[in-house]
Each structure stands twice: as structure tokens, then as C-alpha cells.
Amino acid sequence: MRLLTLEIRATLLINGRNRDADHVPVVKFFNPFGEGVWLATELDEDGDTMFGLADLGYPELGSFSLREMSSIRLPWGMGIERDLLFTGFLPISVWAEAARQTGSIRAAERVVHAAARARRGEE
């Protein structure tokens, strides 16, 4: 699976040019066999350095390498996957706080999605 489509790459690059903003995550990557979830908001002009929230056992805001993530080989020839159904909804600061409070990005998804539904006036 290609980790970035042209559209996702373009959005990440645009966000990368405006570093002072609290961007909504554009894409979610995950390890289908265990720990490892990344929410990316920005991509540097080098085409490799991404910024966002990474969770390899503890959620942290920071930079990570697209090339490094793409090179990870998992059992049965699999690699890191892109969540095709992911929608960020809220800024990365909200995701980071929810992940810190719940202990992981995966647990934070329930909290963030509930907050997004509440903002939209849904049940």
C-alpha cells in the first residue's frame, strides 16, 4: 500500500509551510500487528520528515521519517498501513491531550470522535 496519495502529500506539504498552526491530522498510519500509530499533520519539503503525534508505547508530538516508516517489514510481507477510513476532525493539540489522558492514540480515538460528534450537535 502506498502510504501517501498525491492529495495527502500535497495537504501535508501545505501544512508544513505553516508550522505555527494547530493542524488537523491529515493521515493516520498504524502497525497492523501491534504497537505503532502515527497521526501526521505536516510534511517537510525534503519529502521525508513528517510532524505529528506518534505512539510507540507512549504518545508524543514530534517528527518522524516517512522513509523509515515505509521500510519497516512485518510478518507475511506486510508493512505499516494507512488507515483508509481515518478522519482527523479536531486539531492535533486535542488529539495529543486525549492521547496523554487515555494513554494511547487508539484509546484517544473514542474520546476525539465523541467530542467531534458533540461539536456537530450529534448524539
Image (cartoon, rainbow, N blue to C red):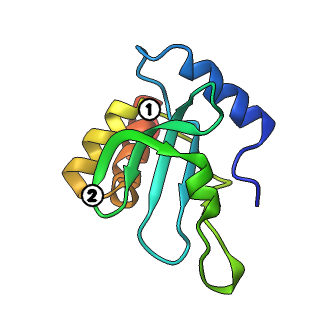
Can you see residue 95? yes
SS for callout 2: loop
Nearer to us in this view, 114 or 93: 93
Place of residue 62 in the rendered image (x, y in percent of width and height, measured from the top left) = 37, 38
Q: Which mark is residue 90?
A: 1
Label 2: which residue?
A: 58
- 99 with respect to 5 (left or right): left
Q: Position of residue 59 (x, y in %)?
A: 30, 51
On the picture, is 82 further left or further right than 56? right
Residue mark closest to the camera, 1 vs 2:
2
Image-based side of 26 in relation to 36, left or right: right
Residue drawn at (39%, 36%) of the image: 118
Where residue 32 sits in the image (x, y, percent)? Answer: 56, 72
Q: Could you say which quadrant of the image residue 116 lies in?
A: top left
Using the image, determine if residue 30 lies above or below residue 78.
above
For badge 1, the amino acid type reads Leu
Amino acid under label 2? Answer: Tyr
